Amino acid sequence: MNIPDTDEDILGVSSEELNNILQSRDEIIQKKILPELVPDVNEEYKSAIPSSVTCVESTSVYDRLYAVFSTDPYLYDQELNRMGRIRRKLPIYIGISFGVITGAMRLVVSYDEFIRTNSLTIFRSQHIARRSAVDYSVLRAILFGVSTGCKVTLFTGGCYTLPLIFSAIQGKTSYWEYAAGWGITSSLYCFNRGLRQMFIAGMFGAVPGLITGVTALIAARRSNLTFEELLAKQLAYTKGNQA
């Protein structure tokens, strides 16, 4: 690089010194020795995150429910979608576990019940007696296990998944969601006992639900994990990758 003498006089350095300065600058930028000289690749993503109010206003109830419970693998690494998958699957897993355990316990009890009830019964053969005992025990165990598993699944889903659905419907996290979810679930659990028992059960379920909701709201705000904040991050991630 040849610089005229007049330019050397203006810059106050020789051409060799100027080349060394430019070479040092290139090394600093390439090796990222000074971070302030390197553009932040995450700055565009951070600035693209919309506010929670904008997210609620720009999305419908269906969009928010889809963001939470979507099975799209593209959203699997997002916290909001991960939370939705856990709350959708966990009640089913708990219900199946309780159903299998209680069904196995009921199998033993039913077999002993059959033996005591039919202790004086005379069967035509030992094979028929054994088969009758097995059929009776297995049928009772299956019915009891399925019934218990369904009840536990509905109860867990109402107390654990329903509050998240309420958050998606209103577009934000609040304290009343757990109170409503627990109260409704407790009330429906006593459906066959009359309206009075349903009302009492709903009140008993709403009180601990309200306490849980307040605690969950405080924890979510302090850890920046409220529904509106997670939704804003997920929308920013989606729009950034689509662009």
Image (spheres, helix red, strand yellow):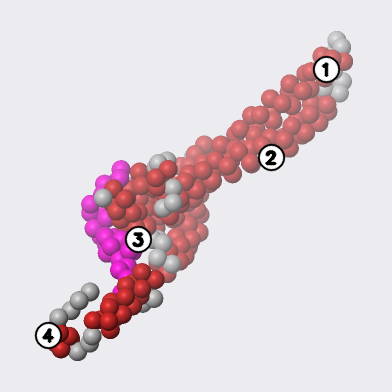
Front label number (4 vs 1): 4
Q: Residue at x 30, y 45 (%)?
A: 63
Mark 1: amino acid: Ala
Q: In this view, does 133 lie above or below 191?
A: above
Q: Does the magenta stretch include residue 74?
A: no
Q: Is residue 102 left or right of residue 214?
A: right
What residue did someone put label 3 on? 229
- The secondary structure type at the circle numbered 2 is helix
Front label number (2 vs 4): 4
Mark 4: amino acid: Thr
The tag earlier along the polypeptide, 3 or 4, is 4
Marks 3 and 4, how far apart in space? Answer: 60 Å
What residue did someone put label 4 on? 6
Q: What stretch is highlighted in magenta?
A: 37-63
The tag earlier along the polypeptide, 4 or 1, is 4
The tag earlier along the polypeptide, 1 or 2, is 2
The tag earlier along the polypeptide, 3 or 1, is 1
Percent x, y of residue 90: 54, 46
**Residue that lies at the very extreme toward the left in this rendered image:** 6
The answer to whether one can see residue 201 in this image is yes
Q: Which of 71 and 163 is in front in this view?
A: 71
Marking on residue 101: 2
Percent x, y of residue 237: 33, 54
What residue did someone put label 1 on? 129
Marks 1 and 2, how far apart in space? Answer: 26 Å
Q: Mark 4 Cα within 10 Å, few/some/many (few <14, many 20+)?
A: few
Marks 3 and 1, how far apart in space? Answer: 64 Å
Q: Is residue 57 magenta?
A: yes
Mark 3: amino acid: Glu
